[in-house]
Image: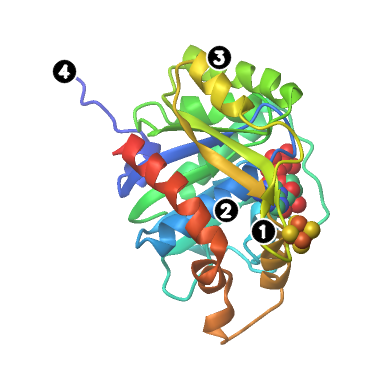
Amino acid sequence: MAEETISPIITNLAGVKHIIIVLSGKGGVGKSSITTQLALCLVNKGNKVGVLDIDLTGPSIPRMLGVAEKQVHQASTGWIPVYVDENQQFCCMSIGFLLQRKDDSVVWRGPKKNSMIRQFLTDVCWGELDYLIVDTPPGTSDEHISIVESLKGVKPGGAIIVTTPQAVALADVRKELNFCKKVDLPILGVIENMSGFVCPHCAECTNLFSTGGGEAMAREFEVDFLGRVPIDPSFILMLEQSSIPESNDLKNTLLAKYSRSNLFTAFSQITDNVVAKIS
Ligand SMILES: Nc1ncnc2c1ncn2[C@@H]1O[C@H](COP(=O)(O)OP(=O)(O)OP(=O)(O)O)[C@@H](O)[C@H]1O
Ligand code: SF4
């Protein structure tokens, strides 16, 4: 009998304990921000985390993590991902690192996108990770089908769906939930982002729009509601400041600043809910 060959993706991801895919039906609802906060929270709770940005046409992870100027190095074993922290507990990979110019855009058809995503899974030295978080483009496109098919046999832990309280985003997110059901991707739950506004002066959270839509939708689809995240100007400020090179100022890295912020406390419960669902 012919010996069964193990897929190079399974081999390369053998050290990755859990894979989380972050989805949203609509653009601009904060998928990359939620990916970033989840990663920062998990690292600050003692996990080793990787972020894979498969938003090939609009990669925002390098900029959000303050590493847009860094480069991916090629080693004999494959691509070395970009490390966000000095202790090498947090790494990321994105097409943004491979573009000649930061404002270059990728206009590719499905097969080329598919091959890039497979390369991210086979050729990046992810090593040992507690969590690999995959940030995706909005909607359900070539990239989504590609990642789900490529991960067959690796079994992703599940998907997180990000929405905002407005009904229009909720209608789009329904499609996303149906996609997960169709491709047999477990749904870890729904996060409602931009749910209220945190005052930069007094830290009071005010509901500008109606909230609770994400929770109601989660109930309707019989999936878990993981929590609400308000619009917090301090988050935007933290990301902007993190892009200023801070060479050896270890107290002021994005990771260190996040660990001291109210954002960490606020996002902590959501992270615990995700971890509880996945373990
Ligand atoms: N909870 C939040 N508090 C403050 N700012 C936020 C929050 N969520 C998102 N933002 C800001 O809103 C903008 C859009 O967020 P983000 O890029 O995460 O959305 P996205 O859904 O990933 O977008 P895209 O469709 O481009 O992939 C960013 O400038 C981000 O900093
Ligand atoms: S209490 Fe109200 S008015 Fe005063 S700073 Fe906070 S949000 Fe603004």
- Residue 195 x %, y %: 66, 40
Name the residue located 67 percent from the left edge and 26 percent from the top edge: 25
Name the residue located 42 percent from the left edge and 54 percent from the top edge: 126
Badge 4 local density, few (<14 within 10 Å), some, or many (20+)?
few
Query: The residue tagged with tag 2: helix, strand or loop?
Result: helix
Name the residue located 47 percent from the left edge and 43 percent from the top edge: 121
- The answer to which of marks 4 and 2 sits earlier in the sequence is 4
- The answer to which of marks 4 and 3 sits earlier in the sequence is 4
Q: Are marks 3 and 1 in contact (CB under 8 Å)?
A: no
Residue type indicated by callout 1: Met
Question: Camera-side residue: 50 or 196?
Answer: 196
- The answer to which of marks 4 and 1 sits earlier in the sequence is 4
Query: The residue tagged with tag 1: helix, strand or loop?
Result: helix
Q: Are marks 2 and 1 in contact (CB under 8 Å)?
A: yes
- Residue 91 x %, y %: 49, 60
The correct choice, above or below, for 268 with respect to 246 in the image is above
Residue type indicated by callout 3: Asn
- The answer to which of marks 3 and 1 sits earlier in the sequence is 1
Question: Camera-side residue: 193 or 39?
Answer: 193
Which residue is under mark 3? 178
Q: Which mark is residue 36?
A: 2
Q: Which mark is residue 64?
A: 1
Badge 3 local density, few (<14 within 10 Å), some, or many (20+)?
few
How far apart marks 2 and 3 lie (CA) works out to 25 Å
Residue 43, image quadrant: bottom left
Does any atom of ligand 1 lie closer than 8 Å to the CB of label 1? yes
How far apart marks 4 and 3 lie (CA) works out to 40 Å
How far apart marks 4 and 2 lie (CA) works out to 47 Å
- Residue 160 x %, y %: 51, 34
